[in-house]
Amino acid sequence: MPIVHIHRLGDTTSSLTAGSAIQKDDGINFICLCHAKNDTLTDTIHRMCTDYIVDTHINRDNAVHTFTEILEEINHSLNTLYLQHKKTDVSVFLGLLVDNHLHFSMFGKELTGIIVSEKNVEDILSDMDTGEGHFVYDSHGDIRENETLYIFSPKIDTHVIGNECSNLGHLAMTERLQLIGERIERSYVSDGMIISIGEEGESVQKKENWAAAKIASKRHPKAIMENVAQVSNKSIQKIQNTFVTLSKETQNWVIISGILLSVILLYLVITSLVRSQYTIFVPQKYRDMVAEARVNLDDATRMIDQPENFWPAVTRVREIIQTVKAADVLKVDVAQLENDIAVLEKAVNKVTSLRPEDYVNVYTFTKTTDSLPFSIHAHETKLSLVTKDTIIWPFSPGEAPKEYPLPNGEKYTFSDADGEWRIYLGTDKDKIYIYDKGVYNIQNIQQVGGWDKALDISVYNSNIYLLGTDRKQVYKHRRQSENTYSGRSFVIADTQARSIMDMDIDGSVWLLSGSGENIGTEKILTAPKYERRPITINSLGINTLQNFNPETTKIYTGESYQEVYILADNRIWVFVPSSRRFSDVRFMTYIGQIDAPNIIITDIAIEQDGDVRKVYFGSPKSGIFSTKITVKDNKIHILPSQ
């Protein structure tokens, strides 16, 4: 098993280079080597890297995944550090050694890395730095018997020092490092560090017994071909000496056998070469693909106002990411590309991501409850929550609410609230109740045996609107008297082609309809005459409302709302209608999305007070939260949550 050794050049107490080897578990070691423009910066970076390593739990099963996460965390920290320093001021090598297998990444101009054996010296770092000032490529490979990996800081000539390392290979590692260090101090610099990874020492007898076939398995193509040529020449000479004494038939068989032998020999050579490409170095084609992805992403950044060009560029980047992911290489670079795409798309799509200080927790569920169906209703600073079998009613943040189980063991399916703070509740028994101040009152329907099955409910002027189970029709039931409604009438007078995903009422009926990539909004006006009006969305940019789950995609409108809200893709989309009069609305303008990272949102409610909107959002899985926003100049502004 390889052992890690560290040798410091010179004897100064302050240095531009810092390095360490941290053992996490039996056979698992982290190696860190940093170089910066001054000793303070060097110490800062080295401490940052080692802190991540020391604080992270790691075992053999999660080693590679954890190593990638550490690289990503360091990348994020470097972004802050570079606000005060240049990227070119820093060079870092980070490696994870599991037994004899090394995973590593680096960046910067002041590091040298070579694999040394008796017959070969191979540079492993010169092509890895991209000049981006953070970890991009992650590579891996075995440190095999009779090989030693040297990482030098600062950068030195690999050819000269590599030959010297090779010549000293018969010495014990500590003695070898001492002599190499003295050579570097005399000829190059007196301030730096050498980290070596390899066997403690090898005897001369062991080297003499190192067979030619062993040399043929080394990485260097020239060494392979020289060895193959030597073996082949001897075999060919032997064949030539005996060939003339054979019969013609035997000669034919020898020729055939020779061809087969040549094919086998060629296969072994090619296999050795291919295997060598997948040890320390990542195949060049994947590096080229990642470079192409970076160019495409840079192009997309310059074309954010050109949807016809932006999306093809981003799509190409995603295709490259999938290909590189499938090869299981360059994980850090892929993660960086994915992060950059997410940041770019959020900026282009006007996505506002809430920080923890931007919202407050107003309710946490103390018992396990189904996530769906679920509703939030808000009215004058108070909330009610409707779960599958209970109404939690009513409470203000900080108060202890009361719970009211649904009657007869029935299960809630949909609900809405009116302006008098009554909740209209549909159940799995095709019944509708009005819940008011702790009492459930069942609602009757005239002339019909019972309520039709439905998927959703909206209430306006005490009239009930139900979304049919075929998602093609909305049924209206007029209130006749206390707890009694008329039979249904049809809101949609013509043939409904697209499936209705959700509806809401603001004096007219809003429909969110469609599926796949064909989702849109429209209004149904019934007075003074029937009108079906498509509502176009302006300034949507590269956004598309597509592929949303009908169970968690909802539209929110109302007389008290100045905006139209859509819950889709676990985000809150905000639109400004063209008029505050519901009958005059012809289009609406997209102004942005609100994203709450790590929170599952299955319903929202909006409470408006002048220019301030308090938005309640969440689910039984995550809890209920609130944030305050205002909308000015068609932009979302987050207000202090307290």
Image (cartoon, rainbow, N blue to C red):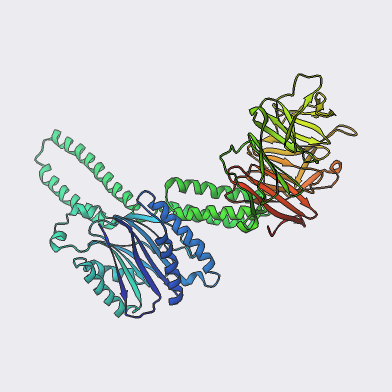
Q: Position of residue 69 (x, y in %)?
A: 45, 55
Provide residue 460's location: percent of width, then percent of height.
81, 36
Tell me where residue 298 appears, x and y as whole percent.
58, 58
Side of 262 relative to 312 (left or right): left
| Residue shown at the point (72%, 52%) measured from the top left | 614
Q: Which residue is outermost to the right?
A: 528
Direction from residue 69 to residue 582 in the image, left or right: right
Looking at the rendered image, the quarter that the C terminus falls into is: bottom right
Residue drawn at the location 35% of the way across and 78% of the way down: 189
Q: Nearer the viewer, residue 452 or 184?
A: 452
Left or right of 559 on screen, residue 178: left
Q: Is residue 307 above or below residue 640?
A: above
Return the residue nearer the eye: 242 or 277: 277
Q: Nearer the viewer, residue 489 or 231?
A: 489
Residue visible at 53% across and 46% down in the picture? 319
In which quadrant will I find the N terminus? bottom left
Residue 593 in sight in this render = yes
